[in-house]
Amino acid sequence: MSKLLDYQDRISVMSWAALFTLAAGSLMRWPEWSFTWWVLGSPITLAVDQVVITSIILAAIACSGTEAVIHSHPLALRVRLRHTWMHWGLPATILVLAEILMPAMPSRTYVVGEILLAGLLLAIAEIAIYHTLAPDDPRYRLARIALNAVAYTVALVLFLLVYRTRVRSLLSATLIASVSALLALELLRGLSERVSDIILYAAITGAILGEATWALNYWRTTSYIAGLLLLLLFYLIVGLGQHALLRRLTKRVLFEYATIAAIGVLFIGWLAS
């Protein structure tokens, strides 16, 4: 019971620190610096403003807090847990997305609601991460389902947000590729004893999503359609990666995913029309 309370206390401390930072970031105004450089013959400007600074702080809170939660697990007391950085991606993405979405909120009421929702998703993710550290945990299956649901929800919000901003392909594709790879790590971890294979499939997922984002930027469509297409592609690539890591990638599985892809594209096409 003491260990259970210990990990819950650590999640509580991290969540309150994140909520305080989000709230403070919405009230404070930081100075802004702009940096411009030329890439592929055209200028790219990077603004280091309040959102960027607060996002860095939130990412640090998420990563350090996740480490604290992981090291409160009984496994960490018996053996040295390796590659714990693979758990950082989802919590950090939740908080950074919450900060990026903050300026788009129409009123203070929406800001408060967004902060509370981010805190809830963060707590769910951290509890689920804790219970998926040991495959024999009685809550492992439920925790894995919760993690998958949160990860795909965060991915959809990311895809909608980035495509809606219409920033340069070099920036948007790089951002989506990086975050998609981090989310894929969370969805693929634990499926193989070879961590290098998991990292490889996550990197492939990120690269494919980045290329798809680059291509979609040349297509005039709504952010909703583009976001759904990217989510469908993300689901398909991660799903195939999961079966490949489990050595279950058969013709039947390929046919099932091809059918899902066809139905998904038809449905999105119907929405677009």
Image (cartoon, rainbow, N blue to C red):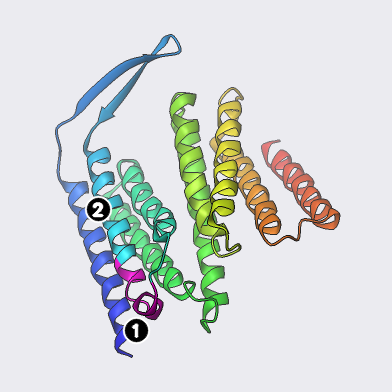
Residue 165, quarter of picture: top left
- Residue type at the position of mark 1: Leu
Q: Nearer the viewer, mark 2 or mark 1?
A: 1
- Residue type at the position of mark 2: Leu
Q: What element carries label 1?
A: helix
The residue at 27%/72% (across/down) is: 10
Return the residue at label 2: 22
Instruction: Check if residue 76 falls in the magenta segment.
Output: yes
Is there any visible trace of residue 164 in the rendered image?
A: no
Q: In this view, does 135 lie above or below 82?
A: below
Front position in the image: 222 or 94: 94
x and y percentages locating residue 233 in the rendered image: 65, 44
The residue at 75%/46% (across/down) is: 261
Tell me the crowding category of disc 1: few under 14, some 14 to 19, or many 20 or more residues within 10 angstroms, Cα based: few
Tell me the crowding category of disc 2: few under 14, some 14 to 19, or many 20 or more residues within 10 angstroms, Cα based: many
The residue at 59%/42% (across/down) is: 204
Furthest toward the top, the residue is 41
Q: Is residue 208 above or below residue 110?
A: above
Return the residue at label 1: 4
Highlighted range, magenta: 68-79
